[in-house]
């Protein structure tokens, strides 16, 4: 799957976003090395703190289906002209499973920038920190 195709999946996932409070639809698509893609959207809640981001939805779907390794690229598509980078909580959750993950931050026009998760969360705290 090309970056452009993964970006398109993330953009499409915005259609499932439940964002009645922020009105900021986000979609995510997580590509694994065998070609499997786990998708997600943001799901807000009246108790704001219970909200989950699109990329953490995709992460939880992957882990809950037994896929905790082999993640290669994550595309995150927001709304607006700005590139949609993951929030701090998502960076931390992703770091647990894929510190070298490629992240594609997408805007609503399908343009994107890329960075590695280790660039987005330098000197992160992960499983090896507990040894
Ligand atoms: Zn987040």
Image (cartoon, rainbow, N blue to C red):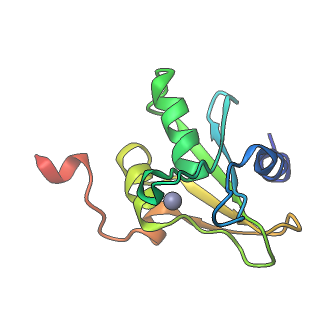
* Total numbered circles: 0
Q: Residue drawn at (60%, 68%), measured in percent from left and top?
A: 85
Q: Is residue 29 left or right of residue 50?
A: right
Residue 47 appears in which quarter of the rendering? bottom left
Q: Is residue 131 left or right of residue 91?
A: left
Q: Position of residue 114 (x, y in %)?
A: 66, 67
Q: Position of residue 10 (x, y in %)?
A: 76, 49
Q: Residue drawn at (17%, 54%), measured in percent from left and top?
A: 129
Furthest residue toward front: 46
Residue 91 appears in which quarter of the rendering? bottom left
Furthest residue toward left: 131
The relative height of residue 110 versus residue 53 in the rendered view (above or below) is below
Furthest residue toward bottom: 82
Q: Residue drawn at (63%, 49%), measured in percent from left and top?
A: 73
- The quadrant in which the N terminus is found is top right
Q: Residue drawn at (77%, 45%), measured in percent from left and top?
A: 13
């Amino acid at each position: 799957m090309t970056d452009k195709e993964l970006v398109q999946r993330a953009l499409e996932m915005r259609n499932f976003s439940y964002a009645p409070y922020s009105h900021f639809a986000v979609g995510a698509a997580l590509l694994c090395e065998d070609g499997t893609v786990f998708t997600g959207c943001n799901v807000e809640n009246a108790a704001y703190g219970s909200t989950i981001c699109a990329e953490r939805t995709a992460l939880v779907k992957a882990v809950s289906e037994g896929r905790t390794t082999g993640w290669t690229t994550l595309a995150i598509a927001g709304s607006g002209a700005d590139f949609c980078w993951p929030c701090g909580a998502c960076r931390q959750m992703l770091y647990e499973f894929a510190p070298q993950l490629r992240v594609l931050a997408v805007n609503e026009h399908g343009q994107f920038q890329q960075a590695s998760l280790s660039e987005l969360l330098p000197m992160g705290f992960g499983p090896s920190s507990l040894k």
